[in-house]
Image (cartoon, grey):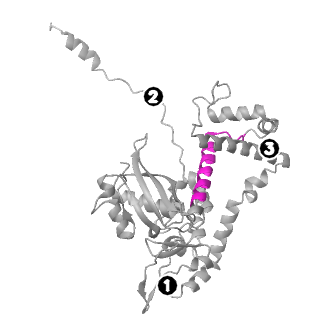
């Protein structure tokens, strides 16, 4: 009889394989979203609509439609190429004649804004969606004739009509089936304006919106919902709008809170763009990691207004995959062009002391100066 030790006793029992858990819950699918910062202004670099997930295609179309034709650069020097025995190039004044026209700086080609959004792959024609939505026009001999034919084509007219109907919610099928009374419309406007007022106040104060438990029985449902309840107790009209209105359109969900916040941010950005109004500007950029350990780039614009005052305006944040000079430059170009600005309008750039930003040969400031030699680099002395 062999002598058993403490080690062999426990090792024999532990060698029995443990059966896998069969009741383990599958991981929850993360909700796919499309943000305004994901808009790619250059039409030659955009991802086709049919390549987006089906869940967010309407979000992508609405985000681009609200922004309108983004790539119509002002003050940009269009490159000239030798075509048909002459030097030819794209002309700035064409934007005023054709409001659907967009220009790709990367491909030196013209695209159609409406055909990109509502391209029909099964119905291509010579002057229709297939050319102006994906390929682009880069031959500048008799371009106005091509633009006129495209503007009068059946596919372009259908795409423009679809865009108008898509943005006009009162013509949608859902709207026609849900014929609501005027009283219910007024209640909806009251709920919307109340939620927007609370959102603007929280944004101005820099306070958090959400709470840990936002159920109706919670003692603390978060700042946003608690302020809505306070608003309802103070104003009788607001209380009636929430209590007697539609229960599936309360304007209180987390997604509605995000949409209201994005709308406020876009309005502020629009005011900043009106202040710049074609002026030359400088950019100040800093990069850091967020809670999810992703690199994000913050950008500030500095310019001089009509009164001679130097103003600084925060433009926004942009997530980047890798903290490299090329990725940072691409993010800069994307943010600048998404607000209908051009790299040729930059007159100064300031970054921290990181080598990927200030590098003399391969840094981001060198890449920007290769494209615009007037964008002089100055070290940010706050670092």
On the image, numbered disc 3 is attached to which residue?
Answer: 187
374, 212: nearer the viewer: 374
Q: Any magenta on residue 161? A: no
Classify residue 165 as left or right of residue 261: right
Real-space CA distance between mark 2 and mark 1, rounded to the nearest whole angstrom: 65 Å
Quadrant containing the N terminus in the rendered view: top left
Q: Which residues lie in the magenta part?
A: 248-272
Residue most extreme to the bottom: 85
On the image, numbered disc 1 is attached to which residue?
Answer: 140
Q: Secondary structure at mark 3?
A: helix
Q: Residue at x 32, y 64 (%)?
A: 366
Q: Residue at x 53, y 47 (%)?
A: 32
Q: Main secondary structure of the magenta part?
A: helix
Disc nearer the start of the sequence (2/1):
2
Residue 111 x %, y %: 53, 73
Can residue 40 be seen by looking at this rendering?
Answer: no
Residue most extreme to the front: 308
Q: Quadrant of residue 200?
A: top right
Residue 69 x %, y %: 58, 67
In the image, which is nearer the foreground, mark 2 or mark 1? 1
Disc nearer the start of the sequence (3/2):
2
Q: Any magenta on residue 249? A: yes
Is 56 placed above or below 142 here? above
111, 199: nearer the viewer: 199
Crowd class of label 2 (few under 14; some 14 to 19; many from 20; radius 10 Å): few
Classify residue 238 as left or right of residue 25: right
Disc nearer the start of the sequence (1/3):
1
Disc 1 vs disc 3: Cβ atoms closer than 8 Å? no
**Disc number for residue 22:** 2
Is 244 placed above or below 67 here? above
Residue most extreme to the left: 2
């Amino acid at each position: 009889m062999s002598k058993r030790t403490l080690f062999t006793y426990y090792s024999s029992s532990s060698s029995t394989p443990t059966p896998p858990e069969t009741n383990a819950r599958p991981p929850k699918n993360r909700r796919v979203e499309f943000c305004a910062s994901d808009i790619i202004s250059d039409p030659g670099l955009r991802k086709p609509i049919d390549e987006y997930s089906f869940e967010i295609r309407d979000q992508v179309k609405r985000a681009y439609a609200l922004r309108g034709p983004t790539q119509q650069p002002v003050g940009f020097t269009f490159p000239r190429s030798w075509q048909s025995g002459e030097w030819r190039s794209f002309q700035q004044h064409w934007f005023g004649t054709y409001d659907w026209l967009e220009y790709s700086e990367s491909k030196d080609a013209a695209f159609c804004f409406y055909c990109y959004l509502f391209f029909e792959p099964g119905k291509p024609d010579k002057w229709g969606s297939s050319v102006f939505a994906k390929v682009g026009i880069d031959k500048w001999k008799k371009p106005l004739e091509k633009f006129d034919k495209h503007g009068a084509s059946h596919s372009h007219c259908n795409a423009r009509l679809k865009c108008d109907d898509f943005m006009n919610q009162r013509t949608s099928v859902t709207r026609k089936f849900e014929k609501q009374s005027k009283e219910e419309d007024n209640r909806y406007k009251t709920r919307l304006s109340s939620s927007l007022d609370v959102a603007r106040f929280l944004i101005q104060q820099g306070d958090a919106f959400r709470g840990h438990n936002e159920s109706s029985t919670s003692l603390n449902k978060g700042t946003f919902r608690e302020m809505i309840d306070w608003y309802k107790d103070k104003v009788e009209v607001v209380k009636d709008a929430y209590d007697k209105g539609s229960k599936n359109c309360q304007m209180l969900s987390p997604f509605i809170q995000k949409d209201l916040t994005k709308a406020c941010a876009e309005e502020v950005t629009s005011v900043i763009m009106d202040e710049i109004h074609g002026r030359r500007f400088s950019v100040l950029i800093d990069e850091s990691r967020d809670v999810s350990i992703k690199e994000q780039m913050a950008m500030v614009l500095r310019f001089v207004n009509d009164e001679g005052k130097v103003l600084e305006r925060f433009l926004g944040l942009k997530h980047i995959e890798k903290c490299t000079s090329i990725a940072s430059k691409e993010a800069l170009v994307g943010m600048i062009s998404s607000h209908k600005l051009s790299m040729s309008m930059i007159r100064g750039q300031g970054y921290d002391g990181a080598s990927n930003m200030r590098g003399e040969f391969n840094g981001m400031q060198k890449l920007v100066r290769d494209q615009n030699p007037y964008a002089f680099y100055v070290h940010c002395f706050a670092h």
